Structure formats: C-alpha cells, structure tokens
C-alpha cells in the first residue's frame, strides 16, 4: 500500500510511455488518486467531462490545464491547485517532460 506520495514513482522510461494512476482512497462520494505524468497531454480534440467535481493539486512538475470557455490554459506548478466543477469540460494541454508531474486528485460528489 502506498504510504508516501513520492515513493514508488514509475521509472522515467515508463513515464514517457504512459501516465500512472494510483487510487489512494475510495469512500462513498469521494475518491483520491495520485497521477504521475511524464510529458503527456490530452489527445487532440479530447475533453474530460466528469459527473462529479475534481480538486487537483500539482505536487511536483508543471502542467497546462484548459477549462472550456477560458481564453487560455492555466499553468500549474508545484503547490498550485484548482477545483474543476462537475460536468466542466477540461483538458491537459501538456505536462513537464523534464521531470515527473505529480498530481493529487480528489474526485467528489458523484457515485
């Protein structure tokens, strides 16, 4: 079981191929996961749109997050967080490819 957010990170070579998602806690109405990215972004034309809210914080690295209707992406660096409302279309424009981007995501409000 993962007990430290910075332990058990995937090797850099694996990160270039795919993000990793580790569920840390799941309870009725809330799910917490660690996401580790290595240069990924959402595919062209793809938007996330989730039935519940999502609060995310970048713990390390950096990312560009675009919420539909906003004129430009939000650049998130270590310590920056954002609350994405339910049914808000959003996409990850990019993540740092020089170092892992470590996210903590709290999904709430949907079954």
Image (cartoon, rainbow, N blue to C red):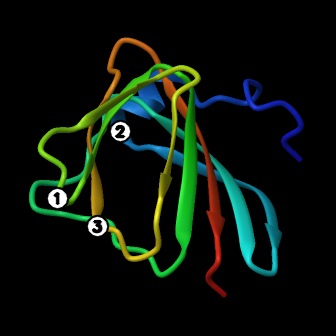
Quick check: marks 3 and 2 in contact, CB under 8 Å?
A: no
Q: Is residue 57 above or below residue 44?
A: above
How far apart marks 1 and 3 lie (CA) works out to 9 Å
**Residue found 53% across the figure and 45% down from its top:** 20
Question: Taking 88 as reference, is 1 left or right?
Answer: right
Q: Quadrant of the C terminus?
A: bottom right
* Residue designated by label 1: 69
The residue where tag 2 is placed is 17
> Which residue is found at the position 55% from the left and 46% from the top?
56
**First in residue order: circle 1 vs circle 3:** 1
Task: Give percent across and percent down for residue 79.
Answer: 58, 23
SS at mark 1 in the image: loop
Q: Residues within 10 Å of mark 1 (few under 14, many from 20)?
A: few
Say which residue appears at 43% left-offset and 75% top-offset.
Answer: 50
Q: CA distance from mark 2 to mark 1?
A: 30 Å
For disc 3, the marked residue is: 89
Q: Looking at the image, do the residues carrying marks 1 and 3 touch, with CB atoms under 8 Å apart?
A: no
Mark earlier in primary sequence (3, 2)? 2
Q: Which element type, helix, strand or loop, lies under badge 2?
A: helix
Tell me if 91 is positioned left or right of 21 in this view. Answer: left
Residue sitting at x 54%, y 76%: 52
Q: Is residue 47 above or below residue 99?
A: below
Question: Relative to residue 100, is residue 88 drawn left or right?
Answer: left
The one nearer the camera, 2 or 91, is 91
Which quadrant holds residue 37? Answer: top left
In what element is the residue under mark 3?
loop
First of labels 2, 1 by sequence position: 2
Picture disc at residue 93: none
- Mark whose residue sits in front, 3 or 2: 3
**Between marks 1 and 3 in the image, the one whose residue lies nearer the viewer:** 1
The image quarter containing residue 6 is: top right
Give the spatial CA distance, label 3 vs label 2.
Answer: 25 Å
């Amino acid at each position: 079981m993962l007990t430290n957010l910075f332990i058990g990170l995937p090797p850099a070579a694996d990160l270039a191929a795919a993000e990793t998602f580790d569920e840390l806690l799941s309870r009725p109405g809330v799910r917490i996961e660690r996401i580790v990215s290595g240069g990924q972004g959402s595919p062209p034309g793809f938007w996330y749109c989730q039935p519940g809210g999502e609060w995310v914080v970048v713990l390390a690295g950096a990312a560009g997050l675009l919420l539909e209707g906003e004129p430009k992406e939000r650049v998130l660096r270590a310590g920056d967080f954002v609350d994405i409302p339910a049914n808000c279309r959003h996409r990850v424009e990019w993540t740092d490819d020089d170092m892992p981007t470590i996210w903590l995501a709290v999904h709430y409000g949907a079954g």
